[in-house]
Image (tube, rainbow, N blue to C red):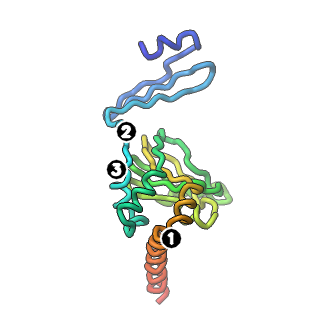
Amino acid sequence: MSLLNGYSAYNCYLTSCFCHKCVIFITFFLKNEIFPLYYSFMDKRIDTDTIQEFLRHIWAFELLQPDQLSKLAQLIHVKKLQPRQTIWLQGQSITHFLIVYSGEIRSLSRSSAGNEKLVSILRKGYHFGLAEMITGAASAVTLIASRPTIILTMNKDALEKVLLKDADICYRLMQTMARTIAVYSRLIGEEQR
């Protein structure tokens, strides 16, 4: 209760507390607003070197050289998500590229009739939004964290500046995307036979 003692003048109430796999969630009211507090024994700072190493294993960046990965790692922001936290809504503009560092995100599609369908589950290493961000397309799905999740995000404007300054990074990303499109084109061709 020592955490809440300092807030007693602000009408604080402990509403929920549970522990699961070394993670504690505490929600309290402070002047009629809800503030979730997230603590984890695994919660340590993710440094640029760790991010760079993580990016090296992401297919979109697999052709990049270490110095190029370093440039991109400097653009990354680490964001912690709570269970059921919405990242994007279907139809919303994509302003950030995201990579799941830990946890899980559900990708959902809603029909015009309001029926919701699970499209995919994004886990560690999965990413979303690069093609949409570059082309300006809106999100075709709603993304919602299923459990405590850490994502790495890269802002569209910051990435665009790097791509305009470094043609080699841009070309290598384009190679990776073109290779992916070629694979899907071949699969579609094989299905039509």
Q: Residue furthest bottom?
A: 193
Find disc 1 in the rendering and name its residue: 167
Query: Picture coordinates of residue 162 (x, y %)?
Result: 52, 60
* Residue 156 place in picture, x, y as percent: 57, 56
Look at 56% across and 65% down and name the residue there.
164
At 51% across and 42% down in the image, what residue appears? 84
Residue type indicated by callout 3: Asp
Residues at circles 1 and 3 in contact by the CB criterion of under 8 Å: no
Mark 2 or mark 1: whose residue is earlier in sequence: 2
- Graded by Cα atoms within 10 Å as few (under 14), some (14 to 19) or many (20 or more), the crowding at tag 2 reads few
The label on residue 49 is 3
Tell me the residue that label 2 is attached to.
45
The answer to which quarter of the image holds residue 96 is bottom right
Q: Nearer the viewer, mark 3 or mark 2?
A: 3
The residue closer to the viewer here, 171 or 187, is 171
Q: Position of residue 62 (x, y in %)?
A: 37, 67
Q: Amino acid at mark 2?
A: Arg
- Look at discs 1 and 3 and give the one toward the viewer: 1
- Residue 3 showing in the rendered view: yes
Q: Is residue 36 above or below residue 67?
A: above
Which type of secondary structure does the marked residue at label 3 adopt? helix
Inspect this view and state whether residue 115 appears: no
Image coordinates for residue 132, horizontal then vertical, percent = 58, 63
Mark 1 Cα-neighbour bin, 10 Å: few <14, some 14–19, many ≥20: few
Question: Given this view, does label 2 or label 1 mark the residue nearer the observer?
Answer: 1
Using the numbered discs, state the Cα–Cα distance from disc 1 to disc 3 in whole angstroms: 23 Å
Q: CA distance from mark 3 to mark 2?
A: 11 Å
